[in-house]
């Protein structure tokens, strides 16, 4: 690992930024996080007015005031960028903006370690990413998510498209999948496993009990103490509440 690697984080979710910084320093204590920038405006201002040197950027894409690509367009950054985002539909644009890797949230230590090794390999050997490698990277990003489930039901195996599941719900350590047609099945996955396997563009972890499908949401109502109440179809017997801490993230996810 290259010693004293200096990194800029562009991330508007404080918890995510802290987690990423923790993982980076756990991998290599010599890594220095130079600054955490939380918006397009702040990113442009800092990168155009500050002389501080750095080696690498980790950047989210959807920030509170726009897409981080605007930062790179207005500052003419030459340093490599690793994009860390919950959305898989910006891969091509990311690689046009000095991107050398594209990591989807939620990320883990192994993914961050892998991308740092990739960065070191590219820097050490002065290799440029070729078109074929880019296409392979984009394909792996966009095709990694589960498209369907083969569900055991009444002595049969039934294929159910992920897109036709309105919501997943867990109770008493059992996970249920509720389809758009109103059918309910049990699935042999935890919500944590489903959160990794399902497309973050289509599904959102609303709380500890629910993962919901964007296309099943009828309305969103303001609830007590900054929380949000989700009205979904087919309706659920349990209220689906998004906490105050996740409300902004949910609204950003829905407004894309």
Image (tube, rainbow, N blue to C red):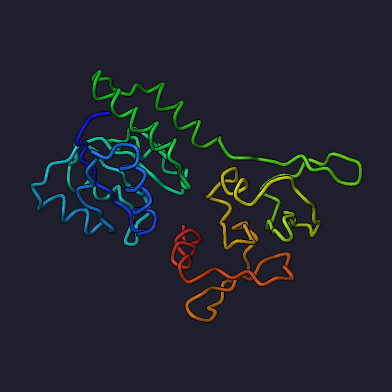
Q: Quadrant of residue 148?
A: top right
Q: Quadrant of residue 211?
A: bottom right
Q: Among all residues in the image, which is located at the extreme bottom? A: 224
Point out residue 154 in the picture as x, y percentages from the top left corner: 91, 46
108 with respect to 127 (left or right): right
Say above or below: 252 vs 196. below
Q: Among all residues in the image, which is located at the extreme right? A: 155
Q: Residue at point 51% right, 37% down?
A: 142
240 with respect to 175 (left or right): left
140 with respect to 1 (left or right): right
The residue closer to the viewer here, 242 or 89, is 242
184 with respect to 112 (left or right): right
Say above or below: 180 vs 117. below
Q: Residue at point 43% right, 40% down?
A: 109
Point out residue 145 in the picture as x, y percentages from the top left corner: 58, 39
Point out residue 108 in the picture as x, y percentages from the top left corner: 45, 42
Point out residue 207 in the picture as x, y percentages from the top left corner: 58, 63
Question: Split into 4 quadrants, where in the image is the N terminus?
Answer: top left
């Amino acid at each position: 690992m290259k010693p004293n690697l200096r990194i800029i984080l562009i991330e508007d979710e404080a918890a995510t930024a802290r987690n990423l910084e923790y993982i980076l320093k756990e991998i290599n204590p010599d890594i220095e996080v130079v600054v955490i920038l939380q918006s397009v405006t702040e990113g442009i201002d800092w990168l155009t007015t500050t002389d501080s040197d750095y080696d690498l950027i980790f950047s989210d894409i959807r920030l509170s005031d726009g897409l981080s690509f605007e930062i790179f367009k207005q500052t003419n950054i030459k340093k490599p960028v690793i994009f860390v985002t919950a959305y898989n539909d910006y891969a091509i644009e990311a690689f046009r903006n000095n991107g050398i890797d594209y990591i989807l949230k939620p990320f883990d230590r192994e993914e961050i370690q892998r991308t740092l090794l990739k960065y070191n390999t590219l820097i050490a050997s002065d290799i440029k990413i070729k078109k074929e490698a880019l296409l392979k990277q984009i394909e792996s990003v966009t095709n990694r998510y589960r498209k369907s489930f083969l569900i055991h039901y009444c002595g049969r195996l039934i294929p159910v498209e992920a897109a036709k599941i309105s919501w997943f719900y867990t109770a008493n350590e059992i996970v249920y999948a509720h389809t758009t047609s109103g059918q309910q099945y049990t699935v042999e996955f935890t919500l944590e496993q489903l959160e990794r396997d399902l497309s973050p563009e289509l599904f959102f972890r609303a709380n500890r009990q629910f993962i919901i499908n964007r296309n099943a949401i009828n309305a969103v109502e303001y609830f007590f103490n900054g929380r949000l109440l989700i009205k979904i179809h087919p309706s659920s017997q349990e209220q689906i509440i998004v906490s105050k801490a996740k409300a902004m993230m949910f609204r950003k996810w829905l407004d894309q």
